Image: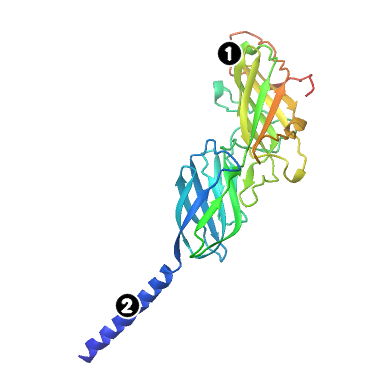
Amino acid sequence: MRKETAYIAIAAAIFASCQKDLCYDHTHDSRLEVRFDWSRSTPDDATAMRAYLFPQAGGKPLTADFAGTKGGMMDANYGGYSAIGVSQPDGTTQIVADRYEDAYVIATETELVSEKSFGISTKAPMPDGAEDETVRMQPSFLYADTCSHMTVSSVNRVLTMRPVALVDTIDVTVEGVENLEYVVGISAAISGLSPAVSLCTLQPFDDVCTMPMTMTKMGEKKIGGRILVFGHCPHEEIHRHVLTIYTILDDGKKYYFNNEVTDKMHDLEHPDEKPQEKHIEIIIPNLPIPEPVEQGSFNPDLDGWTEVDVSVSM
């Protein structure tokens, strides 16, 4: 009888201890409402959002994904946090967010010009002066906000984030394109761009990369394209920017044209736009594409790219 009483006493003590631990954890659990206020930007192309809460006491970040752009509820223990709210990227960008101070979004590496296009195997030349830069895809249209300190408590259960655009838009128009009717492949690339942007400071990285862009025919003598970029020249550092246009003719010949666009890339004064939503327009007045050697006789085995001098100054 005494032995059974002892077992009951031990079981009761264990149950009391578990009950105490459960109660202790429960008093520190909370449901936090995350709101996204779009007064500083317009959520074009954003379809879903993500919130990160980084415990200031240490440990892994808490995350929550929200459909749409308004936000929602997430679990969070009472305490101090640093917070990041960001739109969810597509396959061209990757979020790295293990620590608040080091969180960033980076564009995926890619090829300058597809080597599989038209059976061509020769590697395209990099823009002038950018031979050592990495080549990365253009990012998706991303938005984010950051908060270095916030507290979750019994009286503070709402986190409001005001995202801004993390990308700039560059529109390129090339006029006076000679012999465009013989072109079967065309693309472009811009050097001196930022490969990533910090989610802690919302500023582009100091490193540089080259990003290719798609160009399409817009008329008998006109081509154009648009690219999204993470910005360039952070902290007022001046980098050189070259727009290189690549063309493949119907006889298999390949030509590229380097255009100095540094000054145009630094012209970002757009007072009517919302903060950090920047638009750059680059217009190239002419493109002297040579006539094909043998019209209509495509030869993918022709090796090498030929640089053509663009005599008209930007």
x and y, in percent, of residue 18 in the image: 36, 75
**Viewer-proximal residue among 284 and 28:** 28
x and y, in percent, of residue 171 in the image: 65, 27
x and y, in percent, of residue 81 in the image: 56, 61
Q: The N terminus is located in which quarter? A: bottom left
Residue 240 appears in view:
yes
Q: The C terminus is located in which quarter? A: top right
On the image, which quarter does residue 20 sit in?
bottom left
Marks 2 and 1, how far apart in space?
82 Å
Which type of secondary structure does the marked residue at label 1 adopt?
loop
Mark 1 lies on residue: 298
Which type of secondary structure does the marked residue at label 2 adopt?
helix
Image check: 34 left or right of 107?
left
Image check: 288 left or right of 36?
right
Please determine whether, in this image, residue 93 is positioned above or below residue 147.
Answer: above
Please determine whether, in this image, residue 121 is positioned above or below residue 81.
Answer: above
Q: Tell me the amino acid under the disc marked 2.
A: Phe
Of labels 2 and 1, the one closer to you: 2
x and y, in percent, of residue 257 in the image: 71, 23
Residue drawn where x is 70% and y is 26% of the image: 282
Q: Tell me the amino acid under the disc marked 1.
A: Phe
Residue 32's label in the rendered image is none
Determine the residue located farthest toward the top in the rendered image: 295
Image check: 187 left or right of 90?
right
Mark 2 lies on residue: 15
Residue 303 appears in view:
no
**Viewer-proximal residue among 198 and 310:** 198
On the image, which quarter does residue 169 sit in?
top right
Image check: 32 left or right of 226?
left
